[in-house]
Image (spheres, helix red, strand yellow):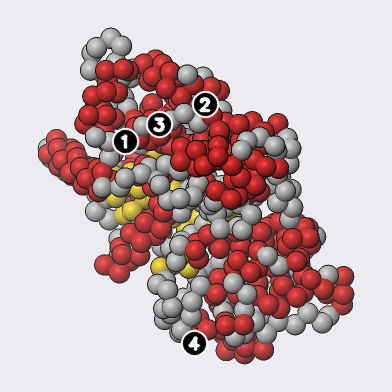
Amino acid sequence: MGCCFSDGALDEPRQKGKGDNKKQETAEETKEFETEVSRKSASVKGVNKGTFVKMLKEPVQNFYEVTKVVGEGGFGKVYIVKDKRTNAIKAMKEVAKTNVDMNKKVDEEIAILKELDHPNIMKIYEVYESSKYYYIVTELISGGELFDKIISAQHFSEKLAAKYMYDIMGAINYCHSRGIVHRDLKPENLLLDSKDDDANLKIIDFGISERLKANAKLKETIGTLYYMAPEVVKGEYDQKCDVWSAGVILYIMLCGRPPFYGNSALELLNCIRKGPKMTDELWNSISADAKDLISKMLTIEPAQRLSAGEVLNHPWLHKYVNNAIEDTKISVDALSNLGAFRAESKLEKSILTFITSQVFGEKEEAELADLFKALDANGDGKLSQEELLNGYHQLRLTSPEEVKEIMKKCDSDRSGFIDFTEFITAATNWNQILQKEQLISAFKLYDTSGDGQLSLQELKNGIPGIKDSEWAEFLNEADKDGDGNISLYELKEYLTKKIMS
């Protein structure tokens, strides 16, 4: 049986006799809030996953039941929760509204998570806000911390360490390409998506991340000292501070202990300034390439340190990480699905993007995520036309002219690239998905009244930015019984006709 929300996770208790007024105020706040979100979303021409991350001013306990408290710190608590609408298990971070600066930090963390779309970065679903707390609902990453795996294994093989480092640096390179610096990379903020040996890593906790303009510097000394780059301590740094932190993590993965130590902060800082040592007996069995990469990631002078992209191109990672597209049924089927993707209108693309971004979990994404990373030759977290063409060429599937058309159909946000969610959306076998529980879960998320029917207003709230003329066309085609609402059967029939015909 799931536990109740703690006092900190509840809105203020309602006074007797004022419940109805409180409910009406909450409903009006929510409607006003959703109207503003819809207005802003309408100005976005394309479709992206961030559009569907709802920001709600409703009691979070109406939608989620806490099953376990899994973490607690100065920022608040982390829970495992069950979605009452779909029974999906998710994670939820509760953050107290302590002051204006903290509120701005949380707003920025939410904005960053909504923007990021990468297979090795935690996915965000919804955000709830009360007068005292924010509740950030994300995917549950169930394999545990990398920190715990290092402790149990003592140290990793070079092959496993390279696999994890490629996951980390791929995600960090993607963040840096978007001007985002994580600033708190450490094994505790790297979670495994399963208990399997080949589990993928996902980066979490963007609570102290920051946006960095070109040629600018960050000033705030922040992060965890054991993983903190020397220039962060000085108070003038850029995105290469993340490369330093990742270098510390790689050092620990290969030898089982940190490169820098001290009995006080001053001793630790003095040790950091001297740089890493790899001279004891343990390092005799570590390859020269691995030691070369560590030394270039832990270079004291940032200008001489490798960038995230340069780390991905280092010979040691290339030796152990094979990015060739395997000629498997999964690869052939996925790229065939990509070529046959038929969602043409913004509404059709929005519905499918909603399902992949809000309903799909690790199980649905795992194999396609591996293929996406294999196609992404430069590790920037998005597929160019050239990378897509190379993938099709390896599997002898299509021509350059057809790849241009595929890019046009699949690039829903019109960025000129295929992002991760766009790839998952277009490469999925929708004939199978429309027969399974994923469509039912999506329907329940749209059906905020819980009456088993989707009203036009519920659809508009769930899929913002669609023109009234397109909604009218949708109702004309989908609403078979003419009652002004859409049933699960009608939604399934509409999507089947549009996507599979």
- Report the residue marked by disc 1: 463
How packed is label 3: few (under 14 Cα within 10 Å), some, or many (20 or more)? few
CB of mark 4 within 8 Å of CB of mark 1? no
> What is the three-letter code of the residue carrying label 2?
Trp
Camera-nearest label, 1 or 3: 3
Measured in 3D between alpha carbons, the distance from the residue under mark 2 to the one under mark 1, in whole angstroms, is: 19 Å
Residue drawn at point x = 55 percent, y = 74 percent: 240
Q: Left or right? Give the position of 485 relative to 64.
A: left
- Residue at the (38%, 27%) spot, across then down: 444
Mark nearer the N terminus (1 vs 3): 3
Q: Which residue in the structure is indicated by mark 3?
A: 344
Q: Dot 2, crowdedness within 10 Å: few (<14), some or many (≥20)? A: some
* Residue type at tag 4: Lys
Task: Mark 3 or mark 4: name the one nearer the start of the chain.
Answer: 4
Q: Which tag is nearer the camera, tag 4 or tag 1? A: 1
* Circle 1 crowding by C-alpha within 10 Å: few under 14, some 14–19, many from 20: many
In the image, what residue occupies the spot 24% across and 12% down?
A: 482
Q: Which mark is residue 234?
A: 4
Q: Is residue 399 above or below residue 239?
A: above
Question: Cα distance, mark 2 to mark 3?
Answer: 15 Å
Secondary structure beneath dot 4 equals: helix
Left or right of 301? Residue 4 is left
Q: Are marks 1 and 3 in contact (CB under 8 Å)?
A: no
Q: Earlier in the sequence, mark 4 or mark 1?
A: 4
Where residue 40 appears, as percent x and y from the top left, is 25, 48
- Which residue is denoted by mark 2 in the rendering? 430
Three-letter amino acid code at the position of disc 3? Glu
Q: Pointer 3 and pointer 4: residues touching (CB < 8 Å)?
A: no
